[in-house]
Image: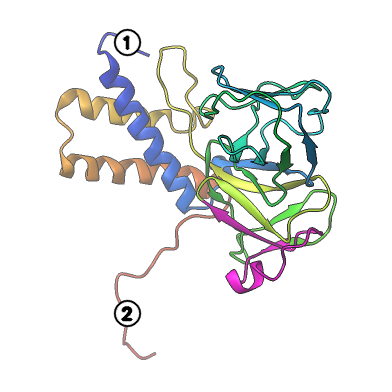
Amino acid sequence: MDETAGTNVYAIVNLAIRTIAKRLYQLNSDLAVGALSVSIYAEDTVTGTDIAFNDADPDTITSTTTDLSVFNSGSYLTVTGESDNNGTYQISSDTAPVTATLTLESDEELSDEAAGDSVTLTSIDDYADLPSDFWGLRPDRKTGKNEIYISGKTSLLDPSPGLSTEIQYTTAGEPQWFRIIDDKLWVFPPTSSDITVAGYYFQMPTAVSAASSVIPYNELFDDAITAAVKRWRTGSLDVNAIKALTAIIWDMVDSIVSKREGHAPPKLPQGVSWECY
């Protein structure tokens, strides 16, 4: 990739990649799909008077005798019994919990507090983070339903019927329903055992930032990206130019998807013939 044009080249390449990705999303194409794997853990609770809180960047929760290794990397826990730090926090996904220390994610903030109070730590059993590149669940092409399931089970999780159902099922058991809120996957009822929710989802493409960056989609759409760069080099990309470029990119994407996966956007007639035969 030519780096002499500076970051503007990367901006237009990323614009083209996102345009391709969104078209693949609209077409429900396998080319934009990844395997979903979200771990949600059964509730664990520990209580002790030897639990301390440390504003250490990353912040930590430590103990002298209470075993903190029962919690899981990347999961959430609530703190009660310690007025300055009561709340919900995420355990670091990069540092596994050990007996004496829980390291929190870098954006979590604790206040320094020595051990002494009777503190309870309780892990969250009804939600977990979605992948950072999550755009949306991939629906089944025939049914149009968003299909996800608990790994090892043979039935699908259904979308939540609504709040009235969610508030009735608060006792831990085997989850039956799910809801996506922001960047988290919720299950109802909360899980009574460690589970992994599996299925397929649409992936946000990784941004190109250097000459060594890998262009996604196995070179299938390099011509579309090249067309975008050429259009940018020969003139400004105003609103009309972007619309025209989008149409070009979509045509290129449609031609590949229709051959590779055997489906494409529906073709509608230009008009209705009222002739009688």
Name the image quarter holding residue 158. bottom right
Mark 1 vs 2, N-terminal side: 1
Q: Name the one closer to the observer, 49 or 217.
A: 49
**x then y, percent, for residue 209:** 40, 18
Specify the quadrant of the image occupied by residue 55. Answer: top right
Q: Which residues are magenta?
A: 157-181
Residue 243 pos. (x, y %): 23, 45
Give how far apart the Cα atoms at labels 1 and 2 are: 52 Å
In this rendering, position of residue 98 left or right of residue 105: right
Front residue (pair 211, 112): 112
211 horizontally vs 40: left or right: left
Q: Residues within 10 Å of mark 1 (few under 14, many from 20)?
A: few
Which residue is at a point 78% across and 21% down the rendered structure image?
Answer: 98
Foreground mark, 1 or 2, reads 1
Amino acid at dot 1? Glu
Look at the image and tell me in which quarter the N terminus lies: top left
Q: Which mark is residue 236?
A: none
Kind of residue at disc 2: Val
- The answer to whether residue 119 is seen in the rendering is yes
**Which residue is situated farthest in the top direction here?**
4
- Magenta span includes 73: no
Residue 172 painted magenta: yes
User: How many dots with numbers?
Assistant: 2
Say if 154 sits above or below 238 in the image.
below
Q: Secondary structure at mark 1?
A: loop
- Per the image, the residue denoted by label 2 is 272
Front residue of 33 and 78: 78
Say which mark, if any, is on residue 3: 1
* Vertical arrangement, residue 275 with respect to residue 90, above or below: below
**Cβ atoms at labels 1 and 2 below 8 Å apart:** no
Q: Residue at x 52, y 32 (%)?
A: 217
Image side of residue 28 versus residue 157, left or right: left
